[in-house]
Image: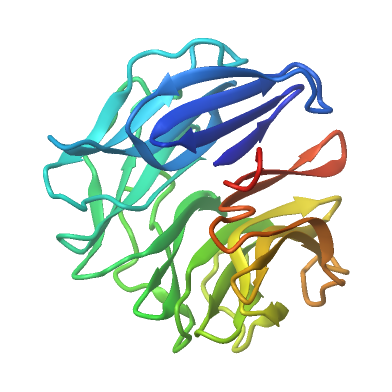
């Protein structure tokens, strides 16, 4: 799920494997329209690519598995072409995590292969993504569960979770043809990192992540010591740790000069709340009190099983997907 903004609001979602784009020509988000983009989608990631909305996703069909890419024919996403296969594999659980960003002017995708245990990167040959290069394996013998791609100081970089640790790796060139031989350990020895997001905060990469055991989950934040992400602080900031499931499906953005997060907050696996929290300074060294945006109680469903935080007309806006009531 990804909230895309320009002079209008676009929201790309998944519903039972169907890719949907919800569009509105008003910044307030009223009078929406829905366009069916494609089928058999999983692990969706959206971005604005050369002025038009685009989506990368893992296609999950019985015959084959593939990383797919589509870019709309127009700026509003009213019509879409056939998807392009960026990478393919017939393994039953291959390519479970996908992230997309614009790198050196062209769309690029990073994805994991849980069968062969590889982390791979591929970049389009043009600004629209009409053709793609051959994927580069960044690391092998590596099980990756969550990942995020971002252009950091002019080069692609990836934050990912592996073996209960949080890592960061950055390419050695602007387009991602070469990568550092070893990743940088950002946070080590923590249990069950489930979700993460990475954005630039005051010109440095910063990572938000949810982690924890069976009793209490925590929402953590850490910002690099330099613009390249070469070194990271020894400790992280605990943003919220007040529920047994804190920080699920988080999304981070810079709102009016300060980092902020939207996330799901669940107590005793029954009472759930969509929360918003913002740092009190531009670097994210301290954070304010979380604000409850919407709450609900239903042990059989999730209030916000995907969130996306963006800035619309100067205000924070949260799009979220859930299976409570009519969400």
In this rendering, the answer to whether 34 lies above or below 245 is above
Left/right placement of residue 307 relative to residue 39 reads: right
Q: Nearer the viewer, residue 117 or 43?
A: 43
In this rendering, the answer to whether 38 lies above or below 14 is above
In this rendering, the answer to whether 101 lies above or below 21 is below
Q: Nearer the viewer, residue 84 or 130?
A: 84
Is residue 189 visible in the rendered structure shown here?
A: yes
Q: Could you tell me which residue is drawn at 21 percent across and 53 percent down?
A: 93
Assign the N terminus to one quadrant of the image.
top right
Q: Nearer the viewer, residue 145 or 18?
A: 18
Which color scheme did the rendering employ for the protein? rainbow
Q: Position of residue 48 (x, y in %)?
A: 57, 29
In this rendering, the answer to whether 320 lies above or below 228 is above
Is residue 203 visible in the rendered structure shown here?
A: no
Left/right placement of residue 216 relative to residue 318 reads: left
Q: How many marks?
A: 0
Q: Could you tell me which residue is drawn at 27 percent across and 68 percent down?
A: 143
Q: Could you tell me which residue is drawn at 81 percent across and 51 percent down?
A: 255
Q: Position of residue 318 (x, y in %)?
A: 73, 45
Tell me where residue 249 sits by quadrant: bottom right
Q: Nearer the viewer, residue 303 or 262?
A: 303
Q: Position of residue 273 (x, y in %)?
A: 73, 61
Assign the C terminus to one quadrant of the image.
top right
Tell me where residue 27 sits by quadrant: top right
Q: Position of residue 268 (x, y in %)?
A: 62, 77
């Amino acid at each position: 799920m990804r909230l895309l903004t320009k002079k209008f609001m676009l929201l790309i979602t998944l519903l039972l494997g169907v890719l949907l784009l919800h569009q509105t020509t008003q910044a307030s988000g009223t009078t929406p329209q829905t366009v069916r983009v494609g089928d058999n989608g999983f692990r969706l990631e959206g971005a604005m690519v050369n002025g038009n909305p685009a989506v990368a996703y893992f296609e999950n069909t019985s015959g084959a598995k593939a990383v797919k890419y589509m870019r709309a024919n127009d700026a509003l996403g009213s019509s879409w072409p056939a998807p392009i296969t960026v990478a393919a594999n017939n393994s039953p659980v291959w390519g479970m995590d996908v992230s997309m960003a614009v790198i050196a002017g062209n769309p690029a995708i990073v994805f994991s292969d849980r069968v062969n245990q590889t982390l791979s990167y591929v970049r389009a040959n043009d600004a629209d993504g009409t053709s793609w290069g051959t994927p580069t394996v960044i690391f092998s013998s590596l099980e990756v569960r969550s990942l995020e791609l971002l252009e950091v100081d002019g080069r692609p970089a990836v934050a990912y979770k592996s073996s209960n640790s949080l890592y960061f790796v950055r390419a050695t060139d602007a387009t991602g043809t070469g990568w550092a031989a070893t990743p940088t350990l950002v946070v080590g020895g923590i249990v069950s990192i489930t979700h993460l997001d990475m954005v630039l905060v005051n010109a440095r990469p910063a990572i938000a992540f949810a982690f924890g055991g069976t009793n209490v989950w925590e929402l953590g934040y850490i910002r690099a010591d330099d613009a390249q992400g070469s070194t990271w602080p020894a400790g992280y900031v605990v943003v919220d740790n007040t529920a047994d499931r804190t920080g699920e499906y988080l999304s981070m953005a810079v709102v009016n000069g300060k980092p902020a997060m939207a996330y799901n907050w669940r107590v005793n696996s029954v009472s759930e709340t969509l929360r918003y929290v913002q740092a009190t300074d531009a670097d994210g060294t301290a954070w304010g009190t979380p604000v409850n945006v919407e709450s609900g109680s239903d042990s059989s469903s999730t209030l916000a099983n995907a969130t996306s935080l963006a800035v619309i007309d100067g205000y924070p806006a949260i799009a979220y997907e859930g299976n409570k009531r009519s969400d």
